[in-house]
Amino acid sequence: MRVRVDGVPVEIAEGASLLDAVRAAGADVPTLCHDDRLPPAGSCRTCLVRAFGHVVAACVTPASDGAEIEVAAEELRALRRDAVEVIVSALPPGAVPPSPAPSPRGLEDDMGGGELARVCAELGVAPDVARGAGGRGRDDSHPYIRLDRDLCIACGRCVRMCADVQGTFALTLTGRGADTVVAPGTGGAWADSDCVACGGCVTTCPTGALTEPGLPARASRPDLTRTRTTCGYCGVGCSLEVLTRDGEITAVLPDLDGPVNRGHACVKGRFAHGFVRSPERLTRPLVRRDGRLEPASWAEALDRVARGLRAAVAEGGPDAVAAISSARATNEENYLVQKFMRVAIGTNNVDNCSRLCHAPSAAGLTASFGLAGGTDSFDDVERADCLLLVGANPVEAHPVVGARLLQRVLRGTRLIAVDPRAVGLARHADVHLRPHPGTNVALFHGLAHVLLAEGLADEEFLRLHAAGLPELTGLLAEYPPDRVAVLTGVPAADVVEAARLYGRAERPAIVYGLGVTEHLHGTDGVRALANLAILRGAVGIGRGYGVNPLRGQNNVQGASDMGALPDSLPGYGKVTDPVATARATEVWGVPVPTRPGLRIPEMFAAARAGRLGALWIIGEDVCATDPDATRVAEALDACPLVVCQELFLSETARRADVVLPAASWLEKDGTFVNFDRRFQRVRPALPLPGEAGTDFAAVHAVAAALGVDLGCVTPADALAECARVAPMFAGLSHARLDREGAIPWPCPDPDRPGEATLYRERFATPDGRARLAAVPYLPPGESPDEDYPLVLVTGRRWAHYNSGSMTRRTDNLRLDAEDRLDLHPSDAVRYAVRDGEPVVVESRHGQATLTARLTDEAAQGQVFCSFHFPSSQVNTVTSGHSDIETSCPEYKVTAVRLKPLRK
Ligand SMILES: Nc1nc2c(c(=O)[nH]1)N[C@H]1C(S)=C(S)[C@@H](COP(=O)(O)OP(=O)(O)OC[C@H]3O[C@@H](n4cnc5c(=O)[nH]c(N)nc54)[C@H](O)[C@@H]3O)O[C@H]1N2
Ligand SMILES: Nc1nc2c(c(=O)[nH]1)N[C@H]1C(S)=C(S)[C@@H](COP(=O)(O)OP(=O)(O)OC[C@H]3O[C@@H](n4cnc5c(=O)[nH]c(N)nc54)[C@H](O)[C@@H]3O)O[C@H]1N2
Ligand code: SF4
Ligand code: SF4
Ligand code: FES
Ligand SMILES: [Mo]
């Protein structure tokens, strides 16, 4: 479209508003109720322009071809000034803060009233116009959000942010006329509302009615330092701007142009940073002397580590040493850890917590398609017209992704949710399938059966691009919907309906989580799920948006990409592949061990059997988060040297012989890879506390204590070296990431963009075909019986993160203070459990004491809890069963019984 703005011609896209046109022409019109992240409301009349012969609000009026838009006329300015004067005059004296930033550089310039101040300055509205009565009061009940009702102009931006971006619908405008003010929809205090503290309303409020504690008034902010980095909690990988002064965090705000988060974030990235200054933070090394952990110098600690490592190798050879690397740490740190193990020790005994979550994804996706990552970018997934969301609860575990998906669903994208629990997006599903935990494979086969039976498979795609159809067709004959209903508990009609929705969609996408992988047959689950996309021709070369795991930890994708795996080198070259080892050997200058190393559970077994002389654990609280935790503790006790690198004295650190104080994501330099395979920069915003060191520095120091120089002195050097070892990362460097922002892998060429979508031409299997998997359904490792009649499912809650070591040391503890056991009201009656009372949940492996929460989110016969409070010992309850292919624990199915708490 072509329009003219004050006579200047400008080209704009179809569907653009007059405001877009004005901006495209380089002209400017002030706005107040408008935010680019939100659908327009047109309520404040600050953006008045003339078009089509009328004075209209530019933000809500669509442009049309040939429109003549008048902006600069003095008469229009006067109308705008009048509109804003009316608004400001209702505010109490002092409501317009002084000295607005001349133009906003980031959100924080506009927060706390900065935006209102700027609009007033632009329009010549004097701050002393504000002479309203005030007296409407405040709400300071919430730890992270403050409401001053006197400053509310009822622009509704917060309400729209909560509804149209976050999707929580916690807010409403109440009252009439000039008394209209924002309030929680539940009526009471903010702290008791549905708010999940994403912070969105605070970042959009133009007047300072909504603020956050800590961020000072606009006028006293010019000396803040901004550091752009990537969130260190979940795998969404939100871009954040950390504001600091004198080495302390003032606020953490979402980046408006973050590729995934686009100006949004969640309670963890946004507010849960108080842990960095917790008095419990480790700031000195500790060594065990006479059975007690005591402060020590780095020199003494490193000497203990070096002696222990040498003794272990002397006694049992290099394979008597093992390391668990950290999915919380950077790529560069993970690269260095695996290099240390392979080069300095000479073993492949290195693994990371991918073992506990998406190892089945890596294995299953590689077997089906050729590479170990999700097939599509999230931007593409968002374009799907039908989502098959399986065993994932992104509203709580990947909140920014959950929010984006929810908005799509509210706008018409069809949703099939597969989850035993009725939580999050499942409550908005067109079809919600609730299989018995552990029966996914049968259910996916049932869906596949219907796709074939009803002619919904893409025959041409199958002929050209897939292998294994005859075998799968044979197997699927055994999975008609009626039988699947018996195996899974999902009504046959629902299986058919779901298959038809997925089968008939134009652009279907599969998104999944741990409800697929953390099972005895988790890899089979991934493969059976991938079958659906292949049958539909909805992946790679086909039409549709593939199969996409919601990887969990901030850098679990990267830890594996960097080769912190017992069978893979950086970039997934196998240690058994002579080509891959030759390449690594050439770069590292020493031969690479070719025998696959131990996986995490095998490390513990080796320790218990007396075959492990040293175990180095970096940023993973195995005693709290690994399953069958009693046996994990036995393993650590049996191992002569346990080194633990931590922020806090975790359950694991307590059992270590040497504890090295580590840096957090806010204090280090490097990169993370998020769930849709994007490398993003991590930059230090804070100095290191006390003698704490980065994991990068600690690995170098341990190597030096053994007399080994690992090379790559800086994180940038480490990524550059990794790029030489792994062809799929050859085009990446810190310098390039600093210039271009996020870059997805594979990225083999420094002059070409990475590949956001995989398999556009062929699959990465030897023959270029996707592989259908004819894997039969096998039951989970534990099933309810007379003694243990309930199934325990474990997973996540929104306010805490994994072991909770960080989130429990922030005000998130005020948002969620204790570990609860969700159970269905009918089960509560059966087992005489009362809401809010303590209950003991017991399995064959251990027991945990939790507070009962009655809810029909849990299915009958099932109970659910998180593992965010190690003191309640949930992981002594979970079993040692694990995925037969990858050893990923069966966290999602444990047979349990309930006992009343003995007083
Ligand atoms: N707030 C918060 N966010 C987090 C984390 C956190 O601890 N807290 N942890 C991060 C990490 S490490 C990870 S890996 C991700 C995990 O993110 P998700 O995979 O979304 O996490 P979970 O809650 O463990 O499990 C997802 C769902 O699987 C369902 N489920 C259980 N059994 C089955 C089954 O047999 N079939 C099906 N179809 N579904 C089943 C559960 O009911 C649950 O709702 O979250 C990341 N984000
Ligand atoms: N019952 C049950 N158990 C589960 C799961 C489940 O669904 N159910 N999920 C499993 C999954 S998917 C995962 S990923 C694991 C997660 O389990 P963990 O990885 O053990 O949990 P986290 O709390 O993420 O972090 C581990 C530790 O790293 C420390 N840390 C944080 N950042 C850094 C850093 O940069 N350097 C160092 N050195 N330390 C750091 C933290 O203080 C914390 O103590 O839990 C698993 N456990
Ligand atoms: S913080 Fe987020 S969830 Fe809470 S009211 Fe504001 S927008 Fe809604
Ligand atoms: S969604 Fe994930 S990456 Fe984004 S702020 Fe929250 S925890 Fe951080
Ligand atoms: S900004 Fe356009 S009417 Fe408020
Ligand atoms: Mo995870």
Image (spheres, rainbow, N blue to C red):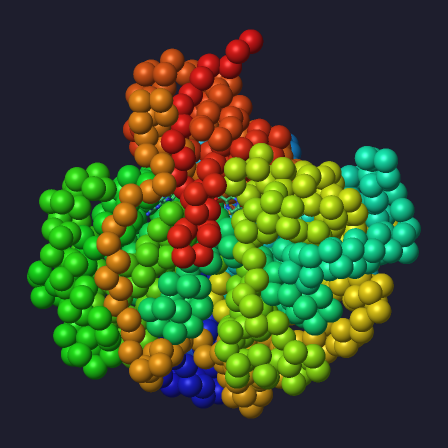
Q: Quadrant of residue 774?
A: bottom left
Give the quadrant of the C terminus: top right
Q: Position of residue 752 (x, y in %)?
A: 52, 88
> Is 328 left, or right, of 711 in this rendering?
left
> Is 363 left, or right, of 438 in this rendering?
right
Residue 220 in view, yes or no: no
Looking at the rendered structure, the number of numbered marks drawn on it comes to 0
> Is 245 left, or right, of 270 in this rendering?
right
Front in this rendered view, residue 469 or 580:
580
Residue at the image point whose x is 13% and y is 53% from the top:
478
Q: Position of residue 157 (x, y in %)?
A: 50, 52
Give the quadrant of the N terminus: bottom left
Residue 903 in view, yes or no: yes
Q: Position of residue 739 (x, y in %)?
A: 64, 81
Q: Position of residue 719 (x, y in %)?
A: 66, 76
Q: Is residue 576 above or below residue 687?
A: below
